[in-house]
Amino acid sequence: MEELKNQQAAPEAADSEAPLDKNVRLMSPTRMVVRRFFRSKLSILGLVMVISLFLFSFLGPVIYTQWGEIQLDESGKTEYSIAETTYTVNGVEYTLRQTTEKYLKDNFLAPPSAEHILGTDNEGYDIFVRLMYGGRISLTVSFIAVFLITILGVVLGGVAGYFGGAVDNVIMRLSDVLMCLPGVPILLIISTILDASDIDAKYRIYLLMVYLTFISWTGTARLVRGQILSLREQEYMVAAEAMGYSTFRKIFKHLVPNVMPQLIVQMSLSLGSMILYEATLSYLNLGVKAPYAAWGTMINIISTNQDILQNHLNVWVPAGICIVIAVLGFNFVGDGLRDALDPKARR
Amino acid sequence: MADEKVLENVTPVYDDEALAAEYLEKRQQKIEEDFKKPFDPDCILEVRHLRKCFPLKKTITGKVTKELVAVDDVSFKLKAGETLGIVGESGCGKTTTGRAVLKLHQPTAGQIIFNGQDITNFDSKQMRSSRKEMQIIFQDPYSSLPPRSTVGGILSEPVEVHNIVPKDQVKDYVLDLMDKCGLRDYYYERYPHEFSGGQRQRICIARALSVNPKLVICDEPVSALDVSIQAQIINLLKKLQREMNLAYVFISHDLSVVKFISDKIGVMYLGSMMEFGSKEDIFKNPLHPYTKALFSAVPNPDPTQKTERIKLEGDIPSPANPPKGCRFHTRCPYAKEVCKHITPEYREYEPGHFAACHLLNEE
């Protein structure tokens, strides 16, 4: 007790807690994360992959204007076909070779050249240019879908986690039901309906992505709910309650920012899966339809033409590589972010 | 007095159900009478027969089949500028009492009168305006600050939400407040993780005081700190109390700290208030056997002085399954038959000195 009274004489003067020097500044959490992110080579590689794809898709068509997305190369092409007929007359075998020279308007299946960097496809479209436009579609669509999924997931998951009880039950059972729905069969039905209605081929992919959002918000909602369930028991939330903050402020200013790390990782990983999803849809001819380009649609060409699959790799392999780069890039970035945001991995 | 009458009729057989029922009914009547009494105008906080139960088991329909009585029949009064120390073992309901007073837990029964208003049944909207009058400081300075805001953000948010000062003066106000709480101005843009426990607790205090409260619940604010920092924080709390005329409810299990800071002391055991009175009354003339035992356990720094320790047998019973009658009877060295069956009434034995014990009624 004496000690306490002695201290009272000069309580502030004896600041024995040794505060940090004014000039020594610790980094903010965000800056620390950025630093740790850039320490990993794989995440830098992922970032480079993603950024270069973006530049390629969005800046590319602005610079490289030689061909348009749906501009056919009508420089013409001569196609030769040889027909052989064998028949026997009086024991002697004759072979008749007939060469047909056909002059066609479109320059299709041209090999890579200065004119067409990656050649043309079976219609006569420039593959290199279509790759850029396809990237635009794929990236935009997956970003929109992930954005919508995140908003829906954060709002519903946040509300479910914060309020608990009946609200939580309703939202989580709804998500269970949505998780039970088989995605692709329903997608087929919707696609058929879209075919029947006269919606521009360019926009149907967006409608499909809205549907995808509707069935895929559940993962994000569960993640957010779980985080908020544990965070709302933290004492700083009790402090926020004691401060008399509104519920909206408590959820969206105090809880959600603390879920951000997990959310960012989830978003970057689902960007990759959305690109895959979009490619799958386009490949199944459900997404972007000809003449518009998407990476999936460009690969789809091989499903009708064996010859292209075997002899014209330049038509479909670049699109496949683009998909791989995009998905890998987003996954590398996501993994890097996850490691960087993990507070236990302080190195 | 209600229970005296009952006790007169008590035959050697105490487990008479009719008697117990009669006793309970009279007690309930007295509680209801107490609820109707006018509010004490001198007191900033008056708690009457506070009770808080937590459900342990629920049926599917949501009906509670088993509950834990965390706080049972706690009453006290607190004047502006005074400090009430609440002491007791871990799990005796000190924290729950503090939080129930702030309505962070909705009380199951009882009355909380704050600033002349009965706030017990205020909904969260009505509470919001009262929130700035009553604040809380937590035990753990690490988990009670949001990790992703700067100190400036943490301190200016409540000021902005409650419109304490005009928008353009918020920063000056916060810097002034930080200065008062012993925080340097360049901490403004730093994050909580950059600080030590004592400094964080200063931030917590500054946050609690940012809205100019009249009452601050200090929920073991120094338990997580080492002794020299404890002294600094307690002196800071005392200084701020003088400057801002704050009333404190100081919850602690450290008797020496409570003795230093409190004007009044309440002793709790297993959810009930055992004894309540001024610091002098409690320390010099403890009435309740539990208080006596508790104070005999305080280590004495003087080795020449021999203290007689009252040793309590057994462990503290589970609050989910508290003993019948007086809650302390299982460990009380003086327990008698009546203690096992009838809960003693919380009564005023000396002016301003309350206790709940059957032994005191006999003298």
Image (cartoon, coloured by chain):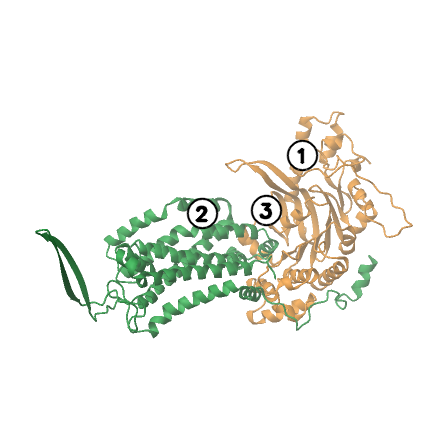
Residue B356 coordinates in the image, percent (x, y): 74, 40
Q: Amino acid at mark 1?
A: Lys
Which residue was labeled with disc 2? A171
Q: Amino acid at mark 3?
A: Gln
Residue B112 coordinates in the image, percent (x, y): 63, 48
Q: Residues within 10 Å of mark 2 (few under 14, many from 20)?
A: many
In front: A136, or B48?
A136
Q: Colour of chain A?
A: green
Q: Residue at x 32, y 50 (%)?
A: A187
Q: Residues within 10 Å of mark 1 (few under 14, many from 20)?
A: some
Dot 3 falls on a residue whose secondary structure is loop
State the quadrant of the N terminus of chain A: bottom right
Whether residue B308 sits left or right of residue A24 in the image: it is right
Q: Residue at x 55, y 62 (%)?
A: B161
Q: Residues within 10 Å of mark 3 (few under 14, many from 20)?
A: some
- 2 and 1 marks in contact (CB < 8 Å): no
Outermost residue to the right: B304
Which residue was labeled with disc 1? B26
Labelled disc at residue B106? 3
Q: Is residue A324 above or below residue A189?
A: below
Q: Amino acid at mark 2?
A: Ile
Dot 2 falls on a residue whose secondary structure is helix
Q: Residue at x 18, y 64 (%)?
A: A80
Q: Colour of chain B?
A: orange
